[in-house]
Image (cartoon, rainbow, N blue to C red):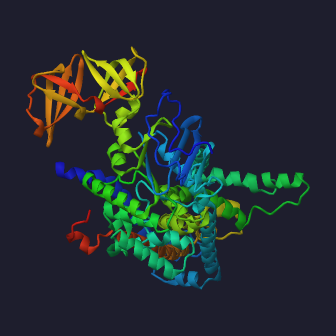
Amino acid sequence: MKRATPFLLVAPALLVLGLFAVSLVSFIGISFLRQDPGGASFGGPLTLDNYAKAIGSEYARHVALQTFMLAVKVTALAVVLGFPLAYVLARSPSRLVRNTILFGLVATFLSGGVTRAYAWMLILGNKGVVNSILASLGLSTLPLINNEFAVIVSVLNFSMPFFVLTLFGTLQAIPVSLEHAARNLGASRTRVFLEVTWPLALPGLVAASSLVFAIGLAAFLFPELLGGGKVHVSATSIYQKIQTDYDLPSAAALSVLFLALTAVVFTAFTLVQRGFARRAEKRLQAAPENLTQAQPA
Amino acid sequence: MTSQTLGIQQQVQSAAAPVVPPVASRAAGCELQVSGLVKRYAGVIAVDGVDLCIPPGKLLTLLGPSGCGKTTILQSIAGFVVPDEGDVRVDGSSVLPIPPERRETAMLFQHYALFPHMTVTDNVAFGLKMRRWAKRDIDRSVGEVLRMLRIEEYAHRFPGQLSGGQKQRVALARAIVTRPKVLLLDEPLGALDQNLREAMQVELRKLQQGLGITSLIVTHDQKEAIALSDYIAVMNRGRIEQIGSPLDIYDRPRNRFVAHFTGVENIVPATVLASAGNKSDVRVFDTVVHGVPGAPLAAGSAAEIAIRAEALDLAAEGAGVNGTVTFARVLGAYVMYEVLVGSHTLMVSAHRRDGAAFDAGANLKVRFHAEQCALLPAEVP
């Protein structure tokens, strides 16, 4: 009875994992089937047609590229905008400043995706906050919505808490005394950043960036609601295959391809992170002679 | 500049001859001078009007409990804290307008603050690299300093691969390689274990004297302060309570705080009978002790005397006040006795070489070595 307890405790987790695996396997299976033209069902024989169509399709390649580029742009902006924010959060002596940033991030974090998408519509819309202000100043309005700009802004907003809070942990773990030491030794603020803060923050930066990149690749809600049908990314194109074309096997094949692409990207991220870990480990390894020699006082 | 003396004593009531002897700094001037330094944090005063002067090549220790403002002073000198009032001068000119990276005050940080992603060599070379020295000169200077501190064999290791003592040396090498005018050390030996700490005290002092580098140490360890320093400034609540040579501080604490903080075991109430010069006759318990050193006080005034455990002698009989041993603890060469005298328990250390051992419960006589005691003005608790 006692020996069964651990298994009982992990059972719910196993069940969830099992369901996940089953659905993964089932849609991989479906991707090799054929949609009954005009019908609501699909079936055999097994075929690679869906893959051939997807890979051969100009549209699918365009979507893949656009998805990838969206993730790249959002990640780059997150680094540029999020690093200073994380740095201030980790270093500011003012509790008010830290709490304000933290509140902003957590509020973003906790408000739902749909809520935020509509909030962005209100801000960016043709009659939204920004354009109303521009109009009242007698300036021409800007096309802020139904384009990639709106999608980037909203995805960036969504992913910022993940980025900043992840990086914040790393930055906070870098002792301020290291930065002080560097300045004391003659480094300007810029040199301190380049020589000390940046290299030590790099592992955290890669981790935070990979999170944002993943969010960017998987973005669905924001491209769908703020892209005005012009921003085609992997998730929306799969959705379209199901909802509009009602071609489940093709949607499944697309999903598998995007999954593979994502796997490649994240393997690359993981390798970089492992490189950092190995280097950090090397710096801590006792040198061989340390093990035998007594330390001189 | 109003003060070229080692330190200005602030708001001390002694109007007569100073307890601090004039130190040989008047002629030499100050390599590092702090005057009227004040720093407040959100209205709370951290440093409350501190004056210091360190003559060239000398080492002064700021000794005080945590939160007494000593680290704030160090950081003001290094430039990481901007003081609200006062001035910091290095070699005669104010450094307050100069950003930290261009001040010639090298700092040794409490936990060394070695760059974990750089080798020992790169850590030590950092300051020279920032000063845009030629590579050849950097290599030569770094090599010299590593040799001087006997850490050449660790040149290619990372800080994470070093022991505490080795890290300490690397931090020291990194600080002195740029030939700073003033070396600032923040609890330099605090992270080391006891044996290593004592060895490093000696080494640090020899190095400092050998290089003749003006130094300021911050510590809360009175033994370290006494072993290392030319001068000690005892700090409390943002002020300097007393400044002087290590022996001044050890032998002649000026008030209860200094006595307590420098480890005086016994502070007992006394009545001043007569003062002449810097010696007083005082009544302690039911005996009179003649010639207790300290700033003179009016006859009849209540006072306290600070008595180190080694300033008391125990004898089975003869002169002295009556006491009863309540506890004895052997400390190797010494035995530390707790002796009940009246309602006070006195700590008395006796060298075992000097005579009889006493057991708990023994009734005996306690005698005072007046010249090793110090008269303190009575304070409102």
Residue A271, x across and y down, in percent: 43, 75
Q: Is residue B300 above or below residue B208?
A: above
Counting the numbered discs, the total is: 0
**Could you tell me if residue A61 is visible in this image?**
yes
Q: Locate the C terminus of chain B by quadrant.
A: top left
The x and y percentages for residue A49 are 53, 83
Decide which of A8, B163 is in the foreground and name it.
B163
Q: Is residue A128 visible?
A: no
Please state if A121 lies on the left or on the right of B262 as rendered. Answer: right
Q: Nearer the viewer, residue B341 or B297?
A: B297
Residue located 42% across and 53% down the image: B110
Q: Position of residue A155 (x, y in %)?
A: 63, 61
The answer to whether B244 appears left or right of A108 in the picture is left
Instruction: Tell me which residue sits at (39%, 22%) in the image.
Output: B275
- Extreme residue in the front direction: B276
Residue at (20% x, 25% y) in the render = B367
Q: Quadrant of the N terminus of chain B?
A: top right
Quarter of the image for residue B313 reads top left
Horizontally, residue B179 falls left or right of residue B172, namely right
Residue B371 x %, y %: 29, 32
**Looking at the image, is B97 positioned above or below residue B123?**
above
Eyeballing the image, is B242 above or below B139? Answer: above
